[in-house]
Image (spheres, rainbow, N blue to C red):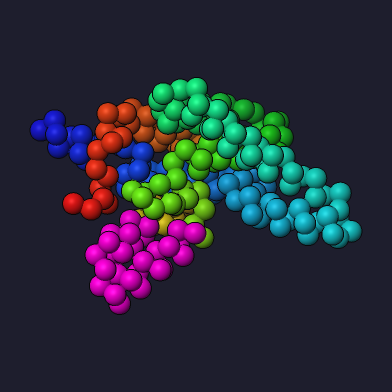
């Protein structure tokens, strides 16, 4: 009984369940910032980079400055993740706790707080998550952006269904699950952000807290759900 509980409910860093949960949070946060924070995608820095270049090259060059803070916050999150990794033996749990704390605090902030500050907080959290949890078994994935995941799933589908490769089939199933989870997170985030407003971010914080509780260091080196047997 205990073995089955750990198998299905304990989370390891490279497991499919961890990737699904984090993708759910990633989709939720994108919907949250878009609906409650003036149509901004805080987790998609490609968009911020393009907007910065477009505005800098146009008559609206002064507006390019507003795209810099989220970009800087994202970089700061990556550096923070690396620092935590160096200083803590259980750095993944520490990152999850930091992510939970920031999201929880953001939900308490009044409407008078500038949207830019909130966007920077979400960008920071997003980069923490990406830098720390980026492997599904031995494959790289992204829990807050779907472009790369979609490409990987498409490539794996060809090898799986045309080449009849069993490993590619597992890869296709895993990445399809991540993409689906991201979409579900965006749907859930849209619904609750619309009706609950700023405090709806506590739902994402709650999901991260549950992840912290179910996460176990002692299963980090066990076989992930998609590993070969």
Taking the magenta stretch, the answer to whether it contains residue 128 is: no
In front here: 31 or 67? 67
Q: Is residue 107 above or below residue 229?
A: above
Q: Quadrant of residue 4?
A: top left
Pick the quarter of the image with the N terminus: top left
Image position of 135 (left or right of 15): right
Q: Quadrant of residue 57?
A: bottom right
User: Residue 84: x, y in percent?
Assistant: 51, 27
Q: Residue at x 31, y 35 (%)?
A: 220
User: Residue 39: x, y in percent?
Assistant: 65, 51
Taking the magenta stretch, the answer to whether it contains residue 174 is: yes
Q: Quadrant of residue 114?
A: top right
Q: Residue at x 27, y 51 (%)?
A: 226
- Label total for image: 0
In front here: 96 or 88? 88
Q: Residue at x 64, y 43 (%)?
A: 37
User: Residue 124: x, y in percent?
Assistant: 59, 36
The answer to whether residue 192 shows anywhere in this view is no
Residue range of the region highlighted in magenta in the rendering = 148-176
Which is the main secondary structure of the residues drawn in magenta?
A: helix
Q: Residue furthest bottom?
A: 162
């Amino acid at each position: 009984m205990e073995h089955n509980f750990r198998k299905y409910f304990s989370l390891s860093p490279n497991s499919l369940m961890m990737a699904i949960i984090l993708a759910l949070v990633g989709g939720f946060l994108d919907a949250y910032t878009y609906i409650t924070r003036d149509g901004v995608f805080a987790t998609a820095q490609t968009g911020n980079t393009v907007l910065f270049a477009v505005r800098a090259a146009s008559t609206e060059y002064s507006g390019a400055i507003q795209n810099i803070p989220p970009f800087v916050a994202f970089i700061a999150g990556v550096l923070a993740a690396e620092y935590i990794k160096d200083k803590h033996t259980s750095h993944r749990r520490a990152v999850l706790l930091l992510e939970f704390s920031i999201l929880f605090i953001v939900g308490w902030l009044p409407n008078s707080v500038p949207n830019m500050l909130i966007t920077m907080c979400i960008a920071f959290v997003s980069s923490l998550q990406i830098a720390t949890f980026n492997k599904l078994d031995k494959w790289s994935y992204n829990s807050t952006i779907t472009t790369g995941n979609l490409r990987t799933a498409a490539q794996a589908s060809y090898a799986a269904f045309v080449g009849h490769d069993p490993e590619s089939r597992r890869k296709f199933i895993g990445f399809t699950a991540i993409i689906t989870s991201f979409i579900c997170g965006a749907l859930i985030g849209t619904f609750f952000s619309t009706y609950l407003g700023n405090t709806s971010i506590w739902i994402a914080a709650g999901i991260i807290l549950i992840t912290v509780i179910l996460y176990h260091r002692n299963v980090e080196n066990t076989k992930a759900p998609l590993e070969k047997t």
